[in-house]
Amino acid sequence: MARLLLDTHTVLWWLTAPEKLHRDAFQSIESEQNEVFVSSVSGWEIAVKRALGKLKAPDNLEAAVKEQDFIPLNLTFLHAEQAGALPPHHGDPFDRMLIAQAQVEGLILVTRDIRIPLYGIRTMSA
């Protein structure tokens, strides 16, 4: 069993364009043997970018995530402190929070961001 945390673009691809996902990532997300987490940070990122007109996403992301039986991962103080302590390999605050959550919770981050592996966390190519 794998414990996966979906990067924001991975969540969006799963919900709106699953053909963009690598086959292994798709199968891992689809597998009932794996636990798949979606962070509240992704909800925040999507809402911000939607409001700025930078992307289109499902209107009720929380319902879409629940419908997929993904596990919501809320932000904690420990996650926030960990994100603040990360080295500056990545400047995006949303990605830094996801990295911290993956570190604290021992999750595999499913992403295509090439800077994220610099943090020494386990990743899977989306």
Image (cartoon, rainbow, N blue to C red):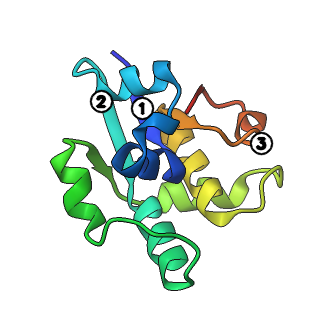
Q: Earlier in the sequence, mark 1 or mark 2?
A: 1
Q: Secondary structure at mark 1?
A: strand
Report whether residue 58 is seen. yes
Q: Earlier in the sequence, mark 1 or mark 3?
A: 1
Question: Where does label 3 land, which residue?
Answer: 115
Image location (x, y in percent) of residue 3: 38, 27
Q: Secondary structure at mark 2?
A: strand
- Residue sitting at 71 percent across and 55 percent down? 85
**How many badges with numbers are in the image?**
3
Question: Where does label 2 land, which residue?
Answer: 35
What residue type is disc 2 on?
A: Glu
Q: Earlier in the sequence, mark 3 or mark 2?
A: 2
Q: Are marks 1 and 2 in contact (CB under 8 Å)?
A: yes
Question: Where does label 1 land, which residue?
Answer: 4
Pointer 1 local density, CA inside 10 Å: few below 14, some 14–19, many at least 20: many
Mark 1 and mark 3: Cα distance apart in space:
18 Å
Drawn side of residue 87 relative to residue 41, left or right: right
The residue lying toward the viewer, choosing from 119 and 13, is: 13
- Residue sitting at 53 percent across and 51 percent down? 9
- Above or below residue 125? Residue 8 is below
What residue type is disc 3 on?
A: Arg
What residue type is disc 1 on?
A: Leu
